[in-house]
Image (spheres, rainbow, N blue to C red):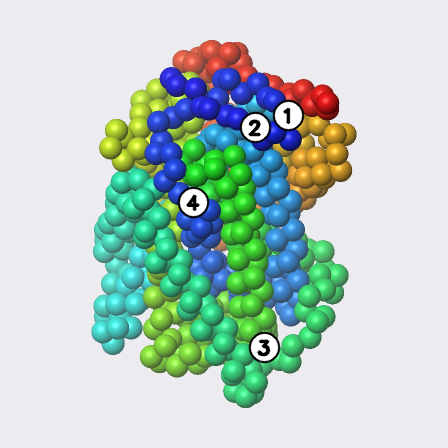
Amino acid sequence: MTQLDVRPAAEDTARDVTDVRGKGLGKGSVGLVGSAVIGISTVAPVYCLTSTLGSTAGEVGVQMPAVFLAGFLPMLLVAFAYRELNKAVPDCGTSFTWTVKAFGPRIGWMCGWGLVIATIIVLSNLAGVATSYFWLLAGEITGSPSIAALDDNKIVHIATCLTLVAVATAISYRGMTATKGVQYALVGLQLLVLAVFVAMALQKASAGSFDTGLDFSWQWMNPFAVESMAAFTAGLSLSIFMYWGWDACLATNEETTGSAKTPGRASLIAMVVLVGSYLATGIAAQMAVGSGDKGLGLANPDTSDNVFAALAGPVMGPALGVLLFVAVLASAAASLQTTFIPVARTVLAMSTYEALPPAYAKVHPKFKTPGRATVMAGVATGAFYTVMTLVSENVLTDTIFALGLMICFYYSLTAFACAWYFRAELRRSARDLFFKGVFPLLGGILLAAVFLKTLVDMWDPAYGSGSTVLGVGSVFVIGVGLLVLGLGVMLVTERRSPAFFRGEVLTKSTPALVVED
């Protein structure tokens, strides 16, 4: 293996990163804008809004914008951790590599497992959503309810889903250049349609077009006005999910120009664009139709799981309303394609450092991508979705609910890894104290608290679809079961790759303090 050339900035500590290995990825394939676009695309803002806007309003009412800001806070704090760790160790393994170097091979391996499993779950969900909107859009365009109804046919639905997964896998397989070109178009379309929706919703609100509309109030931005802690926590969990995926731009750090700094900057740009989009859309929608559970109100249980499907026609009209369906499909399709990036590169890194079988460490000689890891992710996604759909739609739904547990698990570990890895530097300056210590630690604590609260809530059979296993909520069984499965796989892997687990491949290291002249 070749060694990755890591040169810290003049003001940074000289670090022992000689064990960080190059992977053979295509260097310089992505710039700052392209990296930020990948981060935004993976989050899928239009899809997240249509699927959670109503649910969040149902939990916290008019305080929805405040909860969007509250969910943004821990993600921003964790983004600082990712930025600082990336400066020191720009490795495509991101959370896996960094937690190994901070806490050792076993915690690092489980962190990588959490990322991979969370991504596979998301990929399957995105594929299903893209499939549903494909047939819904086809029905809208043709004016044929029978075509839209094809999505209810399991054979047709699964076949379409597998086709979309195959196309997304092929695009990711061909490298970052192909990925970047597709994403510029899809992300641009999403943001443009959102801007049109916001403008038209504000126009409807100004004209008082809907009886349920509300006048804007700054009180909407006050998180302390939420009626109960339970409601706030539920809304916060939904909000955190809405920001998940921005770290995809960090997974391309070995393929980005200025790998030490550009991905971190791109992640912050992506976060700002996302929170701005969420706030603008949430406020505009709330002003236009309100957050109640009647009529077009966002919390109406009949439409809350797919808000844009209900608001497209009334807010934008029949002609432009179709654009909103296109935007949701584009959002899900774009995210389906870019979400392959972090899982494939994490598997590549784990294999490179002997934490997974060596076959996944191969990079395509022409496209400079982790080809085998990408195909593996595609096959796993297709197989997972097919089996879960055939077995029970409730199981698939509950698996998606368990996703929040995985997200908080590996994000919080990464945040704690930052504070621990840089612990010897925290007294060097106020900047180091806050950006390498205080902010990441606070973000990790907040996400760990959500993790524990979610764990408790999952025990209740009413959580998710209401299914149970021996009297315990099936979401709890699935979420904890996936983590336990990871422990089992790790033990098997340890027997086959003892060097990694002895700490001989990727070593724990603590930076020494800089000696000022």
Q: Are marks 2 and 4 in contact (CB under 8 Å)?
A: no
Q: CA distance from mark 1 to mark 2?
A: 7 Å
Q: Earlier in the sequence, mark 3 or mark 2?
A: 2
Q: Nearer the viewer, residue 268 or 398?
A: 268
Q: Nearer the viewer, residue 179 or 2?
A: 2
Q: Earlier in the sequence, mark 1 or mark 3?
A: 1
- x%, y% of residue 450? 64, 45
Q: Are marks 1 and 2 in contact (CB under 8 Å)?
A: yes
Q: Residue at x 64, y 22 (%)?
A: 511
Q: Is residue 475 above or below residue 71?
A: above
Q: CA distance from mark 1 to mark 3?
A: 50 Å
Q: Nearer the viewer, mark 3 or mark 4?
A: 4
Q: CA distance from mark 2 to mark 4?
A: 19 Å
Q: Nearer the viewer, mark 1 or mark 3?
A: 1
- x%, y% of residue 79? 59, 43
Q: CA distance from mark 3 to mark 4?
A: 38 Å
Q: Can you identify the residue that label 3 sits on? A: 287
Mark 2 secondary-structure assignment: loop
Q: Can you identify the residue that label 4 sits on? A: 31
Q: Can you identify the residue that label 2 sits on? A: 8
Mark 1 secondary-structure assignment: loop
Q: Residue at x 77, y 30 (%)?
A: 427
Q: Can you identify the residue that label 1 sits on? A: 13
Q: Can residue 413 be seen?
A: no
